Image: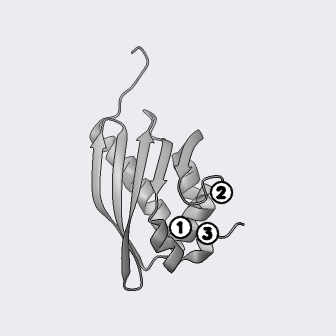
Amino acid sequence: MAGWRVMDATAVEEVTDRWVAAWTSGRTSTLFTLLAAGARVESNLDPDGDFIEKLTGFAAALTSVSVFTRTVIDQRVALVYDCAVDAEQFRLAEFLVVTPTGLVAEVRRVYDLYAIERLMPELLLET
């Protein structure tokens, strides 16, 4: 395609690393710089609410979070995180699409709602 620049896997991984570092440390301003204008966001945790607010609230409630596995295919990334609140462990799945300019154009998150309900019920409340 004329004018279409495809990022190599290393560049996509670098964007993904910045995304993961930003949300896990609660750096909201960095998240906004990484999201493309009009980015598509889907989540099973308050799907109609403020994504960034829920994301930073989730990160703040965690005792620990780490990437369990990451798969990059072209400009699509699938991540599975190991998360913990105190001694309770659970997983989070996230799917990203990175644009050729290095922005995140799509985010899909699948939270373990059973764990959220038990460990962070405040995230399920309407804001």
Answer above or below: position of 102 versus 66: above
Query: Label 3: which residue?
Result: 124
Q: Amino acid at mark 2?
A: Asp
Residue type at numbered disc 3 = Leu
Residue 3: x %, y % from top left = 44, 18
| Inter-mark Cα distance, 2 to 3 | 12 Å
Q: Closer to the camera, 49 or 76? A: 49
Position in image of residue 58 (x %, y %) = 53, 69
Alpha-carbon neighbours of circle 1 within 10 Å: few (<14), some, or many (≥20)? some
Are the residues flagged by discs 1 and 3 in contact, CB closer than 8 Å?
no
Q: Quadrant of residue 92?
A: bottom left
Is the Cβ of the residue at disc 2 closer than 8 Å to that at disc 3? no
Residue denoted by label 1:
26
Q: Is residue 101 left or right of residue 91?
A: right
Quadrant showing the N terminus: top left
Q: Residues within 10 Å of mark 3 (few under 14, many from 20)?
A: few
Q: CA distance from mark 1 to mark 3?
A: 19 Å
Snapshot quadrant of residue 12 = top left
Disc number lying in front (2 or 3): 3
Where does residue 63 sit, x and y in percent of width and height? 43, 80
Q: Is residue 5 above or below residue 68?
A: above
- Helix, strand or loop status at disc 2: loop
Give the residue furthest to the front: 114
Q: Residue at coordinates 28% horizontally, 40% vertically from top-left?
A: 9
Sequence-earlier tag: 1 or 3: 1
Q: Give the label, 1 or 3, closer to the camera.
A: 3
Looking at numbered disc 1 in the image, what kind of residue is underneath it? Gly
Question: What residue is at 58 percent from the left and 76 percent from the top?
Answer: 121
Residue with the mark numbered 2: 50
